[in-house]
């Protein structure tokens, strides 16, 4: 099987690594962009492909694209994408700051196609990453294995492969063909007979559960849908403009520098800005739909609130959920054909990163302010983690809001380490960077 060598390998062709590819390409330093490769396991570049439904919107302003907050003069802005595909007039006339999810998806695909130096390859799934050591035991780089059996060696690595879907342990034993996580919704629905009167449950009380509940109304129009949640009901995201300031890239330093108790308070108080809530327009839409159901005497969809799923089993050709009412402790059973999981993502680091850190021999996974994995040993190699550092870098870490600046920060760190090597200076473990055309907050000076 073949092995290729690149200087920087980026695993995952989502917004995070695309933003980094843009930053590296724009820096134009000797050979780095030409020797960088982004690999994506999908056949296409799509944003949140599992819930890429026609009516879903981004919850973040269009200007928080891959580049504008770092370099508003870039050719990779969302506005330049709209201009290039002839949609700028329509977008402006629509008068909304938040594009449809499909527009962001189209933008990401256009960015991937518009890269001129950094290589971007589809259908390349990473199956494992291992540290590479020289004969002295010094960590010198990474060996990434792909699903086709080939390998890629690199000195620098960035992992931007998203987070692992969360399946509640009580449901984990159910057959996979009965469980549909929100990350699979769009393509798994192709397997489900649309017109049959299925009995289904949606689990979770936040945005992805709400989107599936709404989509099921038209995707399975004859089905009976129970929406099971622990909470007393649905809540709107906290989107007021004061808390939204905490999504500025400049807030990352305040989170990172805070003492643990301070960080914990910030994350706790910001929770409802991104989790456990539903977007206000969607709530209104859902309420209207259920109101009209009642008005028309249709009893097909219901909210089952304050309820724990305390057991789950397969019985014959159905799934049986044991539901415990949190008010009365009463236990009932719900017999179903499918369970839709709007249960979000695993909070811990993704399995790929945990396996890598175990292979390096790390006791814990932590990153520097520049998103570089702390190796606890001298090394010229570096691995950056994107989108999984909420605990240290704040709640915006998994969102588009900070991507452009984060890409600048990582590119700056990478260049500094590279310059250290070129000059024969070993910089591992230090936060001293050579003067770079990127400022500390990730903005490009041009
Ligand atoms: C339904 C949904 C809606 C969202 N809406 C918003 C929003 O409106 N605004 C916002 O700011 N954020 C939103 N988010 C958060 C979202 O995480 C970010 O917008 C953004 O997608 C994060 O980018 P990323 O590159 O870190 O991860 P991802 O977007 O998850 O991209 C990771 C990429 O890596 C690829 N990949 C994964 N594993 C491998 C592998 N082993 N080998 C190769 N490739 C791999 C995946 O196919 C994917 O393309 C939403 C999230 C979800 C789930």
Image (cartoon, helix red, strand yellow):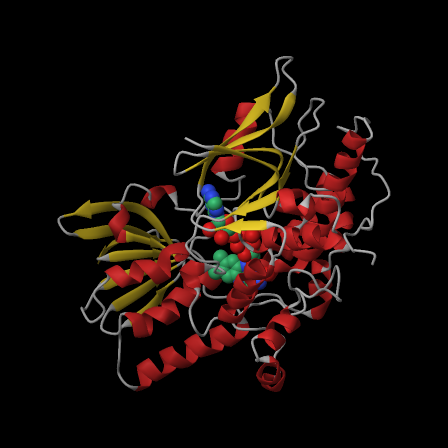
Decide if residue 396 is on the left or right side of residue 330.
right
Residue found 61% across the figure and 13% down from its top = 135
Decide if residue 140 is on the left or right side of residue 294.
right
Q: Is residue 194 above or below residue 271?
A: below
Residue found 39% across the figure and 53% down from its top = 326
Q: Is residue 404 above or below residue 132?
A: below
Question: Could you tell me residue 68's position as x and y percent?
Answer: 71, 64
Q: How many marks?
A: 0
Question: Could you tell me residue 381's position as x and y percent?
Answer: 67, 30
Residue reaching furthest to the right: 435
Residue found 71% across the figure and 28% down from its top = 380
Q: Nearer the viewer, residue 329 or 54?
A: 54
Q: Is residue 438 above or below residue 240?
A: above
Instruction: Evaluate whether residue 25 shows in this view.
Output: yes
Decide if residue 18 is on the left or right side of residue 445.
left
Question: Could you tell me residue 67's position as x and y percent?
Answer: 69, 61
* Quadrant of image for the C terminus: bottom right
Q: Quadrant of residue 222?
A: bottom left
Question: Could you tell me residue 225's position as x and y percent?
Answer: 29, 66
* Quadrant of image for the N terminus: top left
């Amino acid at each position: 099987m073949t092995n290729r060598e690149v200087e920087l390998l980026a695993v995952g062709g989502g917004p995070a690594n695309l933003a980094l590819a843009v930053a590296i390409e724009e820096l134009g330093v000797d050979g780095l962009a030409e020797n960088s490769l982004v690999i994506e396991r999908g056949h296409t570049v799509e944003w949140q492909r599992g819930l890429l439904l026609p009516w879903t919107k981004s919850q973040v302003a269009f200007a928080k694209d891959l580049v504008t907050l770092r370099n508003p003069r870039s050719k990779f802005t969302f506005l330049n994408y709209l201009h290039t595909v002839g949609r700028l007039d329509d977008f402006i006339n629509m008068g909304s700051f938040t594009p449809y999810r499909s527009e962001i998806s189209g933008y990401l695909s256009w960015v991937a196609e518009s890269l001129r130096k950094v290589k971007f390859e589809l259908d390349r799934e990473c199956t494992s990453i291992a540290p590479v050591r020289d004969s002295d035991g010094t960590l010198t780089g990474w060996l990434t294995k792909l699903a086709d059996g080939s390998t890629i060696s690199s000195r620098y690595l960035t992992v931007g492969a998203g987070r692992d879907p969360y399946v509640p342990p009580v449901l984990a034993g159910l057959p996979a063909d009965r469980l549909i996580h929100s990350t699979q919704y769009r393509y798994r629905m192709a397997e489900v007979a649309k017109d049959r009167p299925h009995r289904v449950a949606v689990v979770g009380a936040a945005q992805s559960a709400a989107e599936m509940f709404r989509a099921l109304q038209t995707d399975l129009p004859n089905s009976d849908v129970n929406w099971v949640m622990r909470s007393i009901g649905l809540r709107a995201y906290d989107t007021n403009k004061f808390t939204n300031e905490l999504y500025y890239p400049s807030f990352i330093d305040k989170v990172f520098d805070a003492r643990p108790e301070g960080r914990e308070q910030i994350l706790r108080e910001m929770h409802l800005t991104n989790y456990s809530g539903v977007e206000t327009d969607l709530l209104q839409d859902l309420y209207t739909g259920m109101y009209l159901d009642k008005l028309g005497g249709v009893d097909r969809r219901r909210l089952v609130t304050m309820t724990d799923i305390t057991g789950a089993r397969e019985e014959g050709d159905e799934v049986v959920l044991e539901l415990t009412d949190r008010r009365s402790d009463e236990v009932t059973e719900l017999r179903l054909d499918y369970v839709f999981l709007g249960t979000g993502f695993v909070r811990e680091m993704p399995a790929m990163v945990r396996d890598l850190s175990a292979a390096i021999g790390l006791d814990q996974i932590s990153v520097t302010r520049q998103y570089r994995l702390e190796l606890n040993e001298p090394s010229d190699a570096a691995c950056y983690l994107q989108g999984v550092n909420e605990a240290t870098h704040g709640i915006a870490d998994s969102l588009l809001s900070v991507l452009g600046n984060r890409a600048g920060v990582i590119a700056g760190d990478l260049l500094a380490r590279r310059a250290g090597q070129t000059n024969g200076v070993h910089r591992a473990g230090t936060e001293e960077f050579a003067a770079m055309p990127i400022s500390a907050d990730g903005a490009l000076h041009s």
